[in-house]
Image (cartoon, helix red, strand yellow):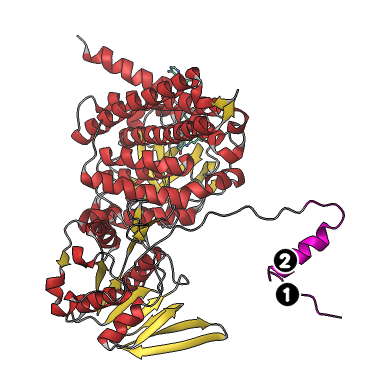
Amino acid sequence: MKIMVLVKQVPDTWGERTLDLTTGWVDRAATDRVIDEIGERALEVALSRRDANKGTEVVVVTMGPAECTAALRKALSMGADSAIHVLDDALAGADLGRTARAIAAAVSGTGFDLIVAGNESTDGRGGVLPAMVAELLRLPHLGSLDSVELTDSTVGGLRSTEHGTATVHAALPAIVSITESLPEARFPSFKGILTAKKKPISQLSLADLGSTFAQTPGTVIRQATAKPPRTAGTITVDSGTAAAELAEFLIAARLVPSPPTR
Amino acid sequence: MHTLTEDQAAIVDAVRSFATSALAPNAIEWDQTKHFPVDVLRDAGELGLGGIYVREDVGGSGLSRSDAVLIFEELAKGDTTIAAYISIHNMVVWMIDTFGTDEQRERWVPGLASMDELSSYCLTEPGAGSDAAAITTSAVRDGDEFVLNGVKQFISGAGASAIYIVMARTGAAGPKGISAIVVPAGTPGLSFGPNERKMGWNAQPTRQVVLDRVRVPVGNLLGEEGDGFTIAMKGLNGGRLNVAACSLGGAQWALDQSIAYLRQRRAFGQPLAAQQSLVFAIADMETELQAARALLRVAAQSLDDGDADAVALCAMAKRFTTDVAFTVANSALQLHGGYGYLADYGIEKVVRDLRVHQILEGSNEIMRLIVGRSLLEDSP
Ligand SMILES: Cc1cc2nc3c(=O)[nH]c(=O)nc-3n(C[C@H](O)[C@H](O)[C@H](O)COP(=O)(O)OP(=O)(O)OC[C@H]3O[C@@H](n4cnc5c(N)ncnc54)[C@H](O)[C@@H]3O)c2cc1C
C-alpha cells in the first residue's frame, strides 16, 4: 500500500505568529519553523500502518519555499520513505484553491492508495484543503476523523459531530483528514536521522506539474492590517454594589444569559 | 568553537526536542514526588538513547563516544537525574554488547536498547566503595550454575531494572578474582532494600541489592572468569564521560536561566545585569564550562580513538567537569537569590543533582589518583 501524507511547515505554534503587512502572508522568518503537529500525527497514522504491514510505502508531500526541506527531512527521519516537494517561486502566496490544485497534480499518477492529512493547519486554519484535493482528484473524502481504520481496500473511522459520532468509511483510493484525537507522532530515532539524508526528495516546479497551473490564483490579498491593540477593560471598584454591576456588565456583553423577566 | 558535524547537529536537535518536550516540563514534579518515569524512558529508547554506542545489529544506535557526550549534555538540560540514569544504563548495555557472546548480546541487548527493559550496574558494597577491588560478594560455581551471595550498595535503578550486572568474587582476593555476572530480575533470592532517601537524584531509585543464594546459569558470565574488574572499569570510562556531560548540561541550563534572570530582575533601580560583579560572575561561569566542554570532548575523542591516555583523560574530564559544573550551578543559585532556593525555579534541584556526580562513577579523589598515577608510571 502506498500512503501519501500531506505535511506543512508552519511557524512554531508556541511562538509569536505575525503577518507581513506588505504581503499579507505569514511572516516565516519571525519564528522557528516546524512541521505542523497535526501533519506529524497524520504521518504517525501512516507509519503505524507500515509497522504492522511490511511493504507499505509512505511518501510525505508538501508545497512551500525551499526552507520546507527541513520539515521534509524531519518527516523522513521519523520514517517516511521519500518526499515530494512542490517548490516554485511563482507559488508564493498561493491561495487554498491553487495549493490544492498543485498538490493534486503532484500526487496524481503516483499510484497512491490513501492520502492522509491533518484537518487544519495551525497557521492558515482553512480546514478545507483535503476536501479540495479530493474534489480535484474525484476521490472520496473522510474529513476530521478521530480514529482511522485501514484495511487493504477500505478506510474508515469515527467523526465527532455536534450531535454525536458518525462512523464513516470509503473504498480506497481515498483521502482522509484527522484530528488531534489521533496519537502524537513518534520521536525521530538517531538511526532515522542518519538515514534520512539518503532518502529521496523529489522537487516539482510548476512546469513539472503541467500547464493548468500557470493560471493566476483565485484570490489575492489586497491589504492586511495589524490587529488593533487591546484596550484596557472595565474596572469595577467595590463600593457595595460590585456584584450587581458585574452581573450587568456580563449580561450587557451577552456573556451570560439575561435573567428571566418576572 | 568546536563545530559539530551535520549529523551531530541533527542528533543534538532531536535530543533537544525530546528533552524540552518529554523531560523539562516534568523534572521538578518527578524530583519532588520521587517518581521514576519508566514510560518516558521507553520513549527515550525509541529515539535510540538506550544503546547509544552499541552496535546496530542488536538494536543499538552505533554512535561514538564523542556523539554520546553531546547527547548527554543536551539531555541533562531537560532533567539531570534522568539523563544520569540513562548514562548508567548505557554503561551496562555497552558492557554486554562489548564483552558478551553473540548469544548473550542477542538475548539481552535488544530489550535494553529499546529501554523496554532497564538495567543496573552493581559494583559498590557497604564495605567497598572507592576500593572496589575489595568487594566480597561471592559467586561460587555449582555445576552449570553460579551461586551468588552478598549485598550491593547504592544501586541506581534497582528494583525497576530487569537486568543486573553483578561484580562478584569467583577467585582469590584482589581485582583478578572478580567476575561480571548477569542476574535477571525475578531470580529467586534476589531482593532489594528500601529506596534510599537522598539529597538529589530523586527521580531515580537507589537501593541495596541483596543476593541470597541467587542461582544463575554459568552462561550468564560476561567474558571469562576473572575478567569482571577490567570489564567494570572499562564500562566506567564511558560512564565518567557521560556523567561529566550530564553535569555540563545541568550547569549550562542553570547558567542560561541566570542570564535571563539577571536581565529581568531589578534591584536598586536597575536590572541585576547592570551590576558589574554579577556580569563577572556569569563570565567566569561561561569560561569554566567552555573549558570543561573542551576537555570533555578531547577525552571522548581519545576513547573513540583508543588512545593510550584515554583512561587518564576520562578521569581528568570527569573530575574537572563535575567540579566546575557543581560550582557553576551553585553560583546560579546565588544569582537567583531566594528564588534560587525554591523548588519551582529548578535551580536548587540541579545543585542537589550535580553534587553526587563528584562522588560516584569513581569519586573525584579517585580520579586524581588515576591521573596522578598515570603521570608517575609514564615518566622514567
Ligand atoms: C546516588 C548514588 C548512586 C550510586 N549508584 C551506583 C550504582 O549504580 N552502582 C554502583 O556500583 N555504585 C553506585 N554508587 C556508589 C558510588 O560509586 C560510591 O559511593 C563511590 O564509589 C564512593 O564510595 P563510598 O561511598 O563507599 O565512599 P568511600 O570509598 O568510603 O570514600 C569516602 C571518601 O574518601 C575518599 N577516598 C577513598 N579512598 C581514597 C583514597 N585512596 N585517596 C583519597 N581519597 C579517598 C573518597 O573519595 C570519599 O571522598 C552510587 C552512589 C550514590 C550516592
* Secondary structure of the residue carrying numbered label 2: helix
In the picture, the disc for residue A217 is none
Relative image position of residue B6 (x, y in whole percent): 21, 45
Residue under the point 62% across and 35% down: B342
What amino acid type is highlighted by mark number 1?
Pro
Screen quadrant of the C terminus of chain B: top left
The answer, for residue B132, to whether it is visible in the render is yes
Residues in magenta, as a range:
A237-261
- Say left or right for B257 vs B87: right
Screen quadrant of the N terminus of chain B: top left
Q: Is residue B275 above or below residue A260?
A: above
Relative image position of residue B92 (x, y in whole percent): 36, 44
| CA neighbours of label 2 inside 10 A, class few (<14), some (14 to 19), many (20+) | some
Q: What residue does disc 2 label? A: A250
Residue under the point 51% across and 20% down: B275
In the picture, the disc for residue A257 is 1
**Which quadrant would residue A124 be assigned to in this image?**
bottom left
Magenta highlight on residue A122:
no
Magenta highlight on residue A247:
yes
Relative image position of residue B210 (x, y in whole percent): 53, 43
The answer, for residue B114, to whether it is visible in the render is no
Do the dots labelled 2 and 1 sit on one chain?
yes
